Structures are given as C-alpha cells and as structure tokens.
Image (cartoon, grey):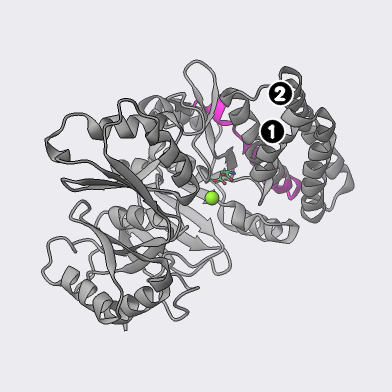
Amino acid sequence: MKVIKIGGGCLKDGPAAGKIIKLISKRGEGDVFVLSAFYGVTNILIAGIQKALENEDTIPSVISKLKSLHHTIIKSLIDDGNKRKQLSKDLSKIFQELERYYYGISFTREATPRMKDMIATYGERISAVILSKSLSSMGKQSCCLLPEDAGIITDGKFMDASAIMSKTSKNLTAALDSIITPQKIVFIPGFYGISESGDITTFGRGGSDYSAAVVAASINAEVLEIWKDTQGFMTADPDNIPHCKLIPKLTYEEAAELSYTGAGILHPRTVEPVKKAGIAIAIKNTYNPDAKGSLITKNAHTANKIIKSVSYTADIAVLKIYASGIGARFGILSQITENLTSSGINIRSVVTSQTCISLLLSRKDIEMGHQSIKKIRPRPFEKSSIVTDVALVSIVGEGLQNNRGVAAKCFTAVSDANVNIEMISFGTSTAALYFLIHEDKLDTTINVLHDIFFD
Ligand code: ASP
Ligand code: MG
C-alpha cells in the first residue's frame, strides 16, 4: 500500500483539483491519500481568527468567502446537480461548526491555542470531504477518515505537535484494516492529530507533509509519495539557476538539510518518521506523473559527485551576544535560549566562540528576539547587536564532511568571486556545510558554486 500526500500547490483551483482527481482515479485504488487544504484556505482561516477577535460582524464574510471558494471548485469537479447538492449539504454542517468557533472567539474575546488549532484544521477537513465525494460521484469506492477517528495521537503541543508513533501505529493499522480494500481510495486530512486528552493539535504550518510521513511509517507503507507541481529536488533554485538539474536520488539527511535551507519541496520534519521506518520518499510531479522525480532513501551515494545541491535562505538574521569566556561560564547559553523560547521565538541555529554567541533567527523574529534578551536580569552579557543583511548558503551532499577538498573548493570559489564569508558552520551535519554572506552577494555566490560543482 502506498501513502500519497497531495499538497495545496496541486489544489489551486477547480481545474487543478480536477486533474488530481483523474490521476487518483487512475492510480490510487487501494492507497491512502493525505491531503492539504485547498490553496490559500489555511491563511484565510487563520486571518479569520484575528478578524473575529476584533469585530463579530466580519465572521459572515469570512465564512462566505470560504464557501464560495470551495463551491467554485466543486462545480468544476462534480457534474451531477443532485450529487453536488448532497455534497453542499454535508459541507454546510462543517461550515456551521466553523462559524460557531468564530463566534465563540468573538464572544469570549479570546483565541486560545486550542481554539486556533481547531479552526486551522478546517481547510483539510473540507478538502478531504470534497475529494472523497468527487471520486464517489464518479463511481469509485472512496471514503474519508479523520485523524481523530483514526487515532493519530500527538504529544498535545498546540501548533507544533509531534506524533506519538507507537500509539498512532497501533490505532491506524486497526482503523485501516477494517476499511481498506484493493479498490478503496482512503483520504485522511493532513496537518493535525489528537492528543491523549482529546485536543485537536496541528503539526505546524506546512505540516501535512509530516502527517503523511507519520501515516506512512505507522502502517509500514511500501513508499511515501509526495505529489507536487514541481519535478523534485534540484541542484539549485531554478529562479537563480535556470539550467539547474533534477537530483534523482538523495539520502534522508540530504533531503532534511535541503528542506531546512529553503528548497520548499518538503516540510523539514517529514524525513523523521519515515527514516526510522526505512520507507522511501518519492517526489512525483503531477504534470508528468510517469517521470522518475526524486527518490529519497538511506543510501543514495553517487559514484564521483559528493555535492548534490546548492541551496540558500534569505530568511535569516544574526543575534550577536558578546561576553567574555563564554565556554567557561555555566548557563549563559541556556538563559538566553530559554528567554527566546518563552517569547515564542524559534532558534534556527547557534554558533559560538569564546567571546560571542551568534544565534540565527528568522528575520521576522530578530527585533523581538533582541528586545527580549535585553530584558534578562541580571544581564549575563556585555553587549548585543543584530545583523539582518545576510543570507545563509549551504552546499549539501552526504560525505562532504569526510572527503578532503570539498570545503576548500567551495571557499576558494567564493573568495575568488570577491565574496566575504561572515560565518561558517561545518562538521555538525554529515551532509551539509553552511555559511553566511552579505545578502547582496547571494546571486554571485550561488552561481559560482553551481558552476564549480555542476558545470
Ligand atoms: N494547510 C496547512 C498549511 O497551510 C498544512 C499544509 O498545507 O501542509 O500550513
Ligand atoms: Mg505544504
């Protein structure tokens, strides 16, 4: 049995969804599909929370926007007027529930993490019903299984939950055993699970990739396929390097590193569950479903090339904290990281020396992070500053750590191009080397690196 994840990028509108429905009906019998919401829906749902907090009168317009977006899609998916009416009836119950949650927020003037997570899941709840009913209307055997009914159990952390694999595996195997047949097409809404105390908890934005990996690992699927509107992992971002090439095979580590620096192909946490279970991930292009795409497995070494991709993110900034003898002082790093964590700020990476701790944060968090650590009393550091005009570049390839000359080749090329390297992190991952450069030099850097490693 395969587990197949379909992303919001493939569910942009009616015609796009229609194409997916055709693909599923041809290839998906006996498989399990984990879905994202239709494109843009989760954003509307989350924006609706703030609107409801501010003014109750905005709720009807949020609901009607969602209704009309979905009804346009349904119109192009289901021809039969009666079947369409039936589906609209089923959906109106779901919209009513959602509306009640918004009024609850508005009435109590409070959006708790529990409430926010519950509301955020409605996009997936709706897309799963629509796709499943569309296939049924074509005479296919199809059903929808909700994570709370299937027993996808989480640790209960709102907006950033993790699945408890042992329990989930037991529950899901039993739930699917009783419904799956060689003809059946099963849809599971992605993005969330349920905690042991019954709370709906999401896996964080973009988390339906992770959901699919959890489902695949739990039922020991033959493969996890990720259906996307792109070819797969590439040797660089096609926006920077139009002649970049597809990477046919990657290791789990390489895929995880590339997901982290922005390739946008997979949610960074997707690899975790399937790697443990030894299940391959296949990235498939819905525009060319017979193409090989990228395959992610344990061993994917290529004979003579170590570097598989040059990647980057500009969503990075550095929080520098100066203090003397950092390596000899107890607790300074934990004081700072605890402070940031309690302000809800994610630390993307840390590099330290004896006189300076450099924390890499998302750009949107840098100002708040800086203000937050300045409030620590007594102040454990002498000075602090931020750097925002940087970009993080990485070269990724399993084995770069223990093969002589790869780092030298990289840095020589960068320095020959007159680019100054502001910070390096090397040796912490077996598959990636990271460094910071001035943002203005990003294009030059990516180009010279792609040239020396791929041309
Ligand atoms: N719909 C959710 C989001 O937009 C989850 C996902 O699509 O992966 O974050
Ligand atoms: Mg996604």
Q: Amino acid at mark 2?
A: Ile
Residue 445 found in image quarter:
bottom left
At 41% across and 26% down in the image, what residue appears? Answer: 170
Q: Is mark 2 within 8 Å of ligand 1?
A: no
Q: Nearer the viewer, residue 54 or 42?
A: 54
| Residue identifier under label 1 | 49
Q: Earlier in the sequence, mark 2 or mark 1?
A: 1
- Left or right, 353 with respect to 84, comes to left
At 12% across and 66% down in the image, what residue appears? Answer: 403
In this rendering, does residue 367 appear at all? yes
**Horizontal and vertical percent position of residue 56:** 81, 28
Element under label 2?
helix
In this view, 292 is above or below 44: below
Residue 67 found in image quarter:
top right
Q: Amino acid at mark 1?
A: Ile
Residue 323 found in image quarter:
top left
In this view, 284 is above or below 278: below
| Residue identifier under label 2 | 105
In this view, 450 is above or below 14: below
As drawn, the residue found furthest toward the right would be 81
In this rendering, does residue 1 appear at all? no
Tag 2 near tag 1, CB within 8 Å: yes
**Horizontal and vertical percent position of residue 277:** 31, 41
At 46% across and 58% down in the image, what residue appears? Answer: 265
| Range shown magenta | 134-151
Is 226 included in the stretch rendered in magenta?
no
In this view, 302 is above or below 139: below
- Left or right, 197 with respect to 77, comes to left
